[in-house]
Amino acid sequence: MSPRRRAAIVGVAESEVGRTPHLTVLSQQAGASRAALAEAGLGPQDVDALFVAGNWSWAPALTLAEYLGLQPDYLDGTNIGGSSFEAHLGHAAAAIEAGVIDIALITYGSTQRSGRSRSAPRPPASLTEQFDRPFGLPQPVGAYALAANRYLHQYGATGEQLAEVAVSARQWAALNPDAYYRDPITVDDVLDSPMISDPLHLLDCCLVTDGGGAVVVAAEDRWPDVDTRPIVVLGHGETTTHSSIAQMPDLTVTGAARSGPTAMKMAEVTHDDLDLLEIYDSFTITVLLTLESLGFCKPGEAGDFVARGRTAPGGPVPMNTNGGGLSYTHPGMYGIFLLIEATRQLRHDFTGDPRRQVDGAQLALVHGTGGVLSSTSTVVLGRS
């Protein structure tokens, strides 16, 4: 074993996204996994670690390993919601650095749109959820609406500032032929869309789609074997602050205030060093809270940070460059797509419209959020 080896993403791929009634969760994961391995120039026989999250099996890692014909020596089924895959990448990097594994496969799949799982009966409330759900709080949107209301009240922020996040995401989606929604929208369009849970309108909320993705991670001494430019994992951090929204210590501060500095300190980078941000956007409020908790702006200033197209194509802070969960896709747990997009941007993969590629991108921060602002995972990626 070679201790302290660096880890890098060497392959990424999505399955079909949108509405895929002809696919199952397993077939989505299998298709994305085969494509990501093929892109890297690797095969199933190279995989010695499998990371998977999802609720479709009592033991997702075991089921998927059998389906893919794998017998990995290292398994991780960590499920902390949408931030699971940034956590998986951090866990894989730690195992690679320790010399425990060489090639890790991280994958996810969901049929929540075609299977209408969002409207399916939920399991009984557990622990402190018993004080939320029986009294009519819709989940998860109601929890985020509570945080949004507190934020608007505490800092005098506005619905227009929330809407800027959705407008910028749609501008990026217009450049992505795979995005679910590509037609332009305005701040007024967001505010005029149906109210879902005050103050969050329909266009403040993420999509409900099917889809899957896969990420292949390799140890440094395997990089000569791969067909892509390795994108190095420079830093990672994760944390949780609560499970149900009633137990969130501060509705305006997320765990990003802890996971972000941990990842950035490990990577030895500052905010000014970063070329692009991939920030989990389950709702527009998620982005504002995350930017502040990560330290990109002071409390109450995120509305100004995203205003006037600053995070849109051509802006000084490129963010959610595929259209995000608000306009590209959101199959329940979106975090794996953040990693896929950041990797492609750092490899300078995009051709065609020059606005799609962040010019000269070298460093990216990727941040996942899970549950109801419950878990956070942050990674810093760099072009090798």
Image (cartoon, rainbow, N blue to C red):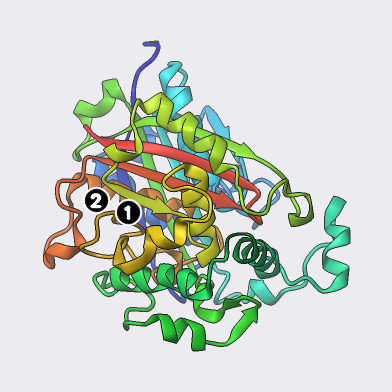
| Residue depicted at 21% across the width and 32% down the height | 384
**Residue at numbered disc 2:** 345
Which element type, helix, strand or loop, lies under badge 1? helix
Q: Is residue 49 visible?
A: no
Q: Is residue 202 visible?
A: yes
In percent of width and height, residue 140 lies at 67, 65
Give the quadrant of residue 265.
Answer: top left
Residue 141 shown left or right of residue 202 in the figure: right
| Residue depicted at 66% across the width and 45% down the height | 59
Residue 9 shown left or right of residue 23 in the figure: left
Q: Above or below — where is 244 with respect to 267?
A: below
State the residue in front, 185 or 333. Answer: 185
Give the quadrant of residue 133.
Answer: bottom right
Q: Above or below — where is 62 with respect to 162?
A: above
In percent of width and height, residue 301 lies at 47, 55
The amino acid type of the residue labelled 1 equals: Glu
Residues under numbered marks 1 and 2 in contact, where contact means CB atoms less than 8 Å apart: yes
Q: Above or below — where is 178 with respect to 306?
A: below
In percent of width and height, residue 230 lies at 24, 35
Residue 164 shown left or right of residue 115 in the figure: left
Give the quadrant of residue 316.
Answer: bottom left
State the residue in front, 352 or 21. Answer: 352
**Residue at numbered disc 1:** 341
Quarter occupied by the N terminus: top left
Q: Residues within 10 Å of mark 2 (few under 14, many from 20)?
A: many
Which element type, helix, strand or loop, lies under badge 2? helix
State the residue in front, 334 or 113. Answer: 334
| Residue depicted at 37% across the width and 43% down the height | 365
| Count of picture labels | 2
